[in-house]
Amino acid sequence: MTTEPTHLADLTATRLTAGYAAGEFSPVEAARAVLERAEAAQAATNCFTRIDPDEALSGAKESEERWRAGAPAGPVDGVPVTVKDLILTRGVPTLRGSRTVRAEGPWEEDAPSVARLRESGAVFVGKTTTPEFGWKGVTDSPRHGVTGNPYDPGRTAGGSSGGSAAAVALGAGPLSLGTDGGGSVRIPASFCGIFALKATYGRVPLYPASPFGTLAHVGPMTRDAADAALMMEVICGADWRDWSQLGPAGGSFREALAGPVSGLRVAYSPSLGWDVPVAPEVAAAVRRAVDTLAGLGASVEEIDPGIADPVEAFHTLWFSGAARVVQHLDDADRALLDPGLQEICAQGARYSALDYLAAVDTRMALGQAMGRFHSAYDLLVTPTEPITAFEAGAEVPAGSGHTRWTGWTPFTYPFNLTQQPAATLPCGVDGDGMPIGVQLVGARHADALVLRAAHALYEAGTAEIPAPTALKG
């Protein structure tokens, strides 16, 4: 195991709360350290839309008083948190990366996950960047510009939760709320070397309802699986505003981390059975993570799930949702949109109701196929991405031949269609020092099992990678 970090900004949420309880340091000291790091992270990568030092320090002082009295408000009391700028936060504009959103507000409401964190005493540091309305798998927007990668700011942080991933990687708060409609917590987490979980749909309440429908999730982006389990226990609290919420989880995510990996039935699929050119260094790193699971006692079989690529069905649902996002805009506002977003909105507006329902049929068949597959296997393991981070400011890698972001991220969007839990954690770096991610996918409702397997890989040292370089020198 690596030596524990000594700088407060580099500690996990679990370690911070243990330190608060023991009187080793205070929430105010942690908030100051994180705010300093947030400013440096912003200068290096442009990962924030706003940083709120006054709110953070005020919240930290209140938390410090609670800890001093021995009465913390909840499991994340005093922990610095950032929130993706698609998620409503009371008193703060949620601009969605778009010049069409008016900052004046009023901004009077917290989204469910934000409300649960606030009730638990979390310290809000700021809002993180997103592409416009979260439409693509990289993070640049007409309103806030390009977000760079913590390991090389000239490369993308991924998206659409790229600001959150960069902030966590650089120590600007150990916890962040992201959203995932086609891979949007997992893509940037893989590119930035952190952990992220897209839980079973409905496990984390979502409000307002996404125009992308039941593809969209809210999820934790953290330093490790243990912090994600901690965060899940807070943000899964029920909220009547989400009619599709699943209700109480029925067990402790943190307690589930201690369960064994031995005996788990693991399917390793290097390419989902499709013609996906996975970079050799990525394939090798993921293979090593799979070997680690086998060494921990899991029963591993290399096998594909036997599904076809559902990208066309995903496009129908995703592009239709994008068209709905901008439906209310007049021509002047539409001219302000990201050109790529304009293109997919135009395509989405051309689909018929029958096209949409055909995509839903494909989705249901895919879900049934994966349900059948998971009757034989507890986990499916794939690369999170077939590549590592590429040039910042581009939707697709130069020379790739892809026209849309879905072309280079084939391992993520299928599991938004099926609503399964899927997590990513780092499993190495390539020859340029860029992080590589491994994806763990479970059956619907098997969120705790996915977290358990990921935690075991952390404990085994699989996720030990070099620290980001963006703040060095």
Image: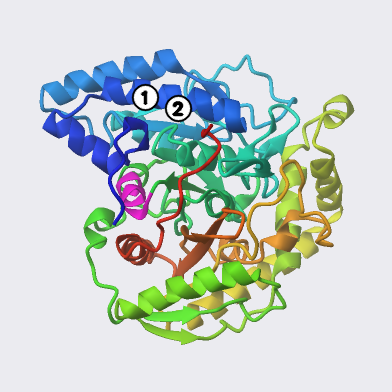
Q: Position of residue 421 (x, y in %)?
A: 46, 62
Residue 225 on the magenta segment? yes
* Residue 376 visible (yes or no): no
Residue type at mark 2: give it: Arg
Q: Magenta segment, principal secondary structure?
A: helix
Mark 1 packing: few (<14 Cα in 10 Å), some, or many (20+)?
Answer: some
Answer with the quarter of the image where residue 31 lies: top left
Instruction: Mark 1 and mark 2 in contact? Answer it, CB < 8 Å.
Output: yes
Q: Which residue is mark 2?
A: 37
* Residue 305 visible (yes or no): yes
Q: Position of residue 188 (x, y in %)?
A: 57, 49
Q: Residue at x 59, y 42 (%)?
A: 162
Q: Residue at x 74, y 45 (%)?
A: 322
Span shown in magenta: 224-232
Q: Which residue is mark 1?
A: 33
Pick the front one: 379 or 194: 194
Answer with the quarter of the image where residue 355 lies: bottom right
Pick the front one: 25 or 225: 25
CA distance for labels 1 and 2: 6 Å
Q: How is the image coloured?
A: rainbow
Residue type at mark 1: give it: Ala
Up the image or down, 353 lies above or below 339; here it is below
Identify the element where label 1 is drawn: helix
Pick the front one: 98 or 205: 98
Does 118 sit left or right of 198 as displayed? left
Count of number-bearing discs: 2
Identify the element where label 2 is drawn: helix
Mark 2 packing: few (<14 Cα in 10 Å), some, or many (20+)?
Answer: many
Q: Residue at x 36, y 80 (%)?
A: 294
Up the image or down, 265 lies above or below 360; here it is below
Q: Residue at x 36, y 54 (%)?
A: 225
Q: Position of residue 347 (x, y in %)?
A: 85, 52
